[in-house]
Each structure stands twice: as C-alpha cells, then as structure tokens.
Amino acid sequence: MNSLTRHCSLAPLRTPPIHRSMRTLDRAQFVKVVPCLALKVPAPKANTAMKALGPYLLNWPRMKNLVGEGKERLVLLDAAPETDLGEIQGLDSVLETALSGVPVEKTSFEVKVGYEYWTADEILKAVLPEDIEVITAFETIGDIAHMNLRDHVLPYKHLIGQVILDKTARLTTVVNKTSSIHTQFRTFPLELLASRNPAHTPTSLETTLSENGCQYHLNFATVYWNSRLHTEHHRLVHKYFSPGDLVADAMCGIGPFALPAAKNKGCAVVANDLNPESYRWLVKNVEINGLAGTSAAAGEGDRPPAGYVKPVNECGRDFIRTSTSRLATLLASEIVPTFERMAAAEQQRADSKQSKGKDPASHLALVKQYQASIAKWTDKEVPVHVFAHYVMNLPASALGFLDGFLGMWAEHAEHRAYLRTVRPMVHVYYFTRAGFVGRTDGESEEAAIHRDAKARIAYVMGAEPEELEVHRVRLVAPRKDMCCASFRVPESVLFGETVGGDVKVELEYDLHEEEGEGEGDSDESVGGKKRGRREVDSEGEAEGAAEGAKKAKVDE
C-alpha cells in the first residue's frame, strides 16, 4: 500500500489527454508530461535505495522507477516535485535508517509519455463520449479482429479500429460487421476499419489460424467462422467420438469438427458443406493437415496421411439421405487403404525407435488402434456399415434437416436386427428461447430447454429422440441460447415408419431473428451505453485459447 498522503499521489494524473471531438486518430495529441519528485542517489547504491523506498515509488505500469546513467541515478517517487520530503508519511524514517550513510538529494524528473504508452482502453476513454462504456473486446480470426460496433459509436469507428490495430501486435486488420447474418451460407457484410495488410479488402480477408491442434486457412469474408466455439468443437469431439468411429459432418464449414475428429481422435470423417467457398477451403485445410487420405491404387512414395477426411459439396439433407449408400465404396477405395498406410508408417517409426534403443510404445499403440479400426471396417460379418455420428452445425435451421433421417435405412430392412444395434448418434445445433420464454411454474431453465428440444426434434422426425442430452453452448443474445442436442435416432425413423411435421416450422424458426437481433448480437462490441446490460457468455473464454474471444456483452 502506498504510504504517501493522499494529496501527494500522482495516480490521478496517469490518464491521457481528453479529446472528445476527435474522429480521426491523431497520435501526437496523446503526449503528456507529468513532473514528479525524485531522489538522486549514487549508482552503486541505487538498488539499495529502490528496496528501501518501495512503498513510495511512482510505480506507473510499463515504466521504470529508476532512471539515469553514469555515476548517479534518479529514483522516481509518487509525489509532485514541490512536495516537501517531510510531508510524506514515514519517508524521514526510511532516510534516517535504511538509507543512512547514502547521499540522497531531492530533485525532480519529467515523466513524458505518448500515444504508445496508453492502452487501447485508456485512449478510447479519452475520445468516446463520457456516457459510453468502453469495451475493447473483439473476436480474433487469425490476424483479423472482428468487431460489432453499436450505432452510437459508428462516428468513431475508424478511430476505434486504428487504436485496436495499433495496440494489438498480432493483428493486421480490423473489420466491423455492418449487418446481421442474412445469407444462405451464414456470411455477413464487413467493412474495413483499419489495416496494414494491402491484400485485405471487405470481400477478401484471407487468414490462417490454429485451433485444437489443426491449422485452418480461410477467407473470413466468404465463409463462416466463430472463434468463440473452439471449446465446443473440443467438447463434442472428445466427449462422443472414439478411434475408428465413422463420422458424417453434414454442415461442416471449413472443418472445425471434422479435422480434429480425424487428426486427434482417429475417426474417419466424411465432411459436407453446401457453400462452394467453404468446400474449397475445406479441401485446402484437409491437405494442409495431412488428412486427404489415399486411394487403394496410391503409391507409397508420398508422405503417409495423418488421418482421413473426405470433403463433399452438396445439400445437407441429400448428404444425410445418401450417406449410408456411399459409405461401402469409400471404405474399400479410400478409408481402409488410408489407415493401412497410417499403420505401416507407425510401425516403421516404432522399428526405427527400437533400433536406436528408444521406447516405441506410443507408435505401437497407434498401430494397434489403426489395425483395430481396419478390422472393424473389413469385418465380413457386418452386413451394412453405417456412420456412428452425424454432426449438424447450422443452428439457424439444422433441426429442419432432421427429416433426412426419415427412411434412411428402409432399403436395408432385411438387416434390421443388426442395424437396430448400431443406430447413429446425431449432434444438432440450434437456437432456442425456451430457457427464458414459456417456462411452466417451477420449471428450471435446463428442464425447459430439454423439453423444448425433445418436442422440436420429435415434430420433425415423427418420433421422440432417444438418449437425449442437451448442452447449452452459449448465450448468443438476450433470452436466446445456442444449444447442442445429442440423441440416438429412433429405429422407426430410420426405417421410414414415422411421418414428420412441416420442416418449414424449423427452417423459419429463427428467420425474424436473422433479420434483426439474431446471432450477430452475440459478437463482442465496443461502445455499450452505460445502462442496464446483461452479460452474454463468450463460449470457451475460460480456456484462454489464443484464438478465442474475451467476454461479450449486449444491450438489453
């Protein structure tokens, strides 16, 4: 605790100059000079003086308390230069005891700081209107900062963008979303606020990022990506998927579920997205991560794959309906040959380590894992191979695509006794207000959300979901959750014995929100009014991932 009397402290002066009328950033206007009290001491005694004077030091962030060169040093104190040393409570005692015998001379020093010293938060507080709460949070996508500015701070948008860019070394571009998601492919219009990358334009924002051990390349202007979902991607893959699982990702984007499922869990994944741009970047990301697989006719000269992801570009509903029929061909022509090469490569690594007297256990474990997967996929006793999991990550409308499972196995009715034991799990993402609207007396938010999911899934499929688990992913707007419902598809649905409801009910469930409030209001923002606000969870924040987002807030 500082021992200075209150009138001596310089802490209130550690603020940048105020420029409420500034719209275009002028860095020269943020220079500030603050004179402070200093004690001149011999250089050899500087460390002794610093330790003794600890409670009295200036202690401004990112600034040294000891300055000067040569035979003397200045110890900066948290007091104005005209302050008499006797006014500082306890200082006389320190000078007479701990620093007795040390020649100390009272002097002054001018602390000069400029734009580079102040934080983004401090600069913005100095330029934005006083009634606006400054929030310097943003979503990071590679080297791009994605902001969602409120209308009342738009006059300052380029200044805000430039400050964020200046103060965040890893960034090259700052963009602002100009309206909510409203396209078929869940992209949204963007404007550049500031950039030092000449290749970046509002329609071309290519960047790279890392998430869950995978590398991703993308154009943020043409594909959907949300860094806040990184822990949800991890949660689903690691909770439900096992080595050797066959996974169908029906609305995969550029692969945030598909790639880690293949690379980290040893699954074989078929990944589909309707957006041609998402498909193009998915193909690139599959190749970059060594997951392109190999065909039965491939040679042995190229580098062995690290896993298997098969990119597909078609309608999600069609993808689901035809998924079982395409699987047998993929297993024989691509999946099994890929895992055979992976097993052979790990065996070679194990042999190499063993020849050098090193422990080959980790490689041998992978050989065993891959061979077990191959044995499962080539088992002659299995009449029909099927996917173990379907991922449907299109929260605005994915529930409306569940009709793709109606009668999906009808043509395999003769194998029903076997197939009923391997019914797939579906993991479908959707929006809901059930935790806030329409709850019965005494019903918890969780119970209401579970009831809502069960009813909506049953409406589309004509039968209640089995083994239903609902996970609240994040609050995307006031009174609106994004959730993931994981369930096993009922046998009656798969064999075409049910009749589902009108899928338009689900396809249009969130339509009015997409035009207005929508998921866009979940984005982190700069410039919230100083009035009643409720905090919105930024999923994954606690994990502290480099590409993650910080705390998000929205207006009530």
Image (cartoon, rainbow, N blue to C red):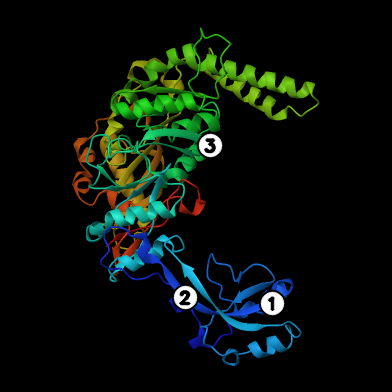
Are circles 2 and 1 on residues that touch, CB within 8 Å? no
- Pick whichever of labels 2 and 1 is earlier in the sequence: 2
Depth check, front residue: 511 or 460 = 511
Are circles 1 and 3 on residues that touch, CB within 8 Å? no
- Residue under pointer 1: 49
Looking at the rendered structure, the kind of residue marked 2 is Val
Residue at image position (71%, 23%) is 350
- Residue under pointer 2: 34
**CA distance for labels 2 and 1:** 22 Å
- Residue under pointer 3: 213
Residue at image position (48%, 21%) is 292
Classify mark 3: residues with Cα within 10 Å, few (<14), some (14-19) or many (20+): few
Depth check, front residue: 525 or 256 = 525
In the rendered image, residue 511, in percent from the top left (x then y), is placed at: 20, 43
Residue 467, located in which quarter of the rendered image?
Answer: top left
In the rendered image, residue 277, in percent from the top left (x then y), is placed at: 32, 28
- Vertical relation: 128 (above or below) 280: below
SS under mark 1: helix
In the rendered image, residue 175, in percent from the top left (x then y), is placed at: 32, 47
Indicate the quadrant containing the C terminus: top left, top right, bottom left or bottom right: bottom left
Residue 32, located in which quarter of the rendered image?
Answer: bottom left
